[in-house]
Image (cartoon, rainbow, N blue to C red):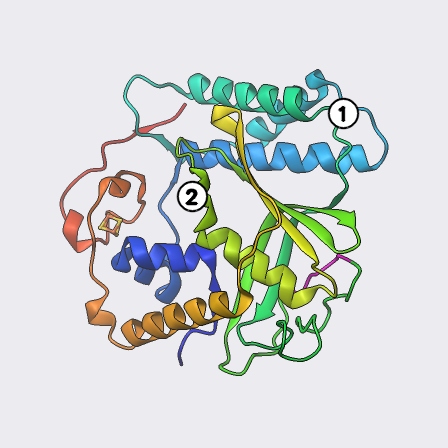
Amino acid sequence: MPSDRFSYSRLQLFDQCLAKYRFIYLDGRPAGGESIESYLGGRLHEALEWLYRERRTGRNILFDDLLNQYRSLWKEAWHGNIHIIRTGWQTDDYYQLGQRCLAGFYRRHAPFDEPVDGTERIISFTLDRDGLPGQGPPGQGLPGTPRGSGLPVAGTARVQGQDGCIMTAILDRLDQHGQGWWSIHDYKSGRKMLTPSQAEKDLQMKVYYLALVKTLENTERVDVVWHFLRHDREVVLEQVQWNPQRIVTMLEKRVEKIREREAQPRTLQPRESPLCNWCYYWDVCPAKAGQTRPARLAK
Ligand code: SF4
């Protein structure tokens, strides 16, 4: 059976390393640990989700409130299989880095009055041309996706598109400014920054954009915003002019290529790169047989 569920992460991993792709998506093998960068990113996302959730109840959030929440999230989620790769860095350095990320975000956005429609929003849609401009009525999301309410859901819906392929997008935050004007927000906690021209080509945001166009009644204007928390910088594309049909075509080609390779599992071979240091499949990776990851347990 060809795979029928895709996400940006899955497409990205296929480009990075085919062996790791196989371990995760075909074999369903759990990772043998977590990097502290991934752990930090998870807590920052949770802290910002909490911030906007609380703010929507009318509560005024002080910076100390946010820091306290971050502290409890960090403590509660801690487990014994988190690793540090960078030499000279300790657990507390990452914890403090997270505090600095939140301080920058707080300074920039307090009092958090953005018209937030939702956080960690899961949108699933069929990878076809239904609902795109010139292809019939808009908003052909999966059943359970409220039309025009700005509340697309359906992470577990089981209806399939023309080629049996469902894409899922998870938006860190979605703002609704009214009259079909939306902003998609993505929080980045890593070191990598995008230039505006790289942002214009970013596949992740194009998938998210397509998710909106496919599932909402009115997407007159869509802005996309990357929050580079570590750098206290933002990259904003206003009124994106992406062509949804082209995005669908591009995704269809990628899915087709993936399915072809999946049909020949022996061709899903390791592709070594610096990212191997953040990979938790060394024990089963043929390229790393007998080697030990250059990482230490975080305490
Ligand atoms: S260790 Fe490197 S080559 Fe091996 S599966 Fe992981 S990313 Fe791929």
Residue 77 seen anywhere in this rendered image of the structure: no
Q: Which mark is residue 169?
A: none
Q: Which residues make up the magenta segment? A: 150-154
In the drawing, what numbered circle is on residue 111? 1
| Rendered location of residue 51, percent (x, y) | 71, 32
* Number of marks: 2
N-terminal of the two: label 1 or label 2? Answer: 1
Q: Nearer the viewer, residue 80 or 174?
A: 174
**Disc 1 CB within 8 Å of nearest ligand 1 atom:** no
Residue at 77% x, 65% y is 146
Residue 284 is drawn in which quadrant? bottom left
For image coordinates 74% across by 57% down, the residue present is 151
Q: Quadrant of the C terminus?
A: top left
Which amino acid, mark 2? Ser
Within the image, what quadrant is residue 15 found in? bottom left
Residue 111, image x, y percentages = 76, 25
| Residue depth check, mark 1 versus mark 2: number of the one nearer the observer | 2
What is the distance, in whole Å, between disc 1 and disc 2 at their CAs? 31 Å
Q: Give the amino acid at mark 1.
A: Pro
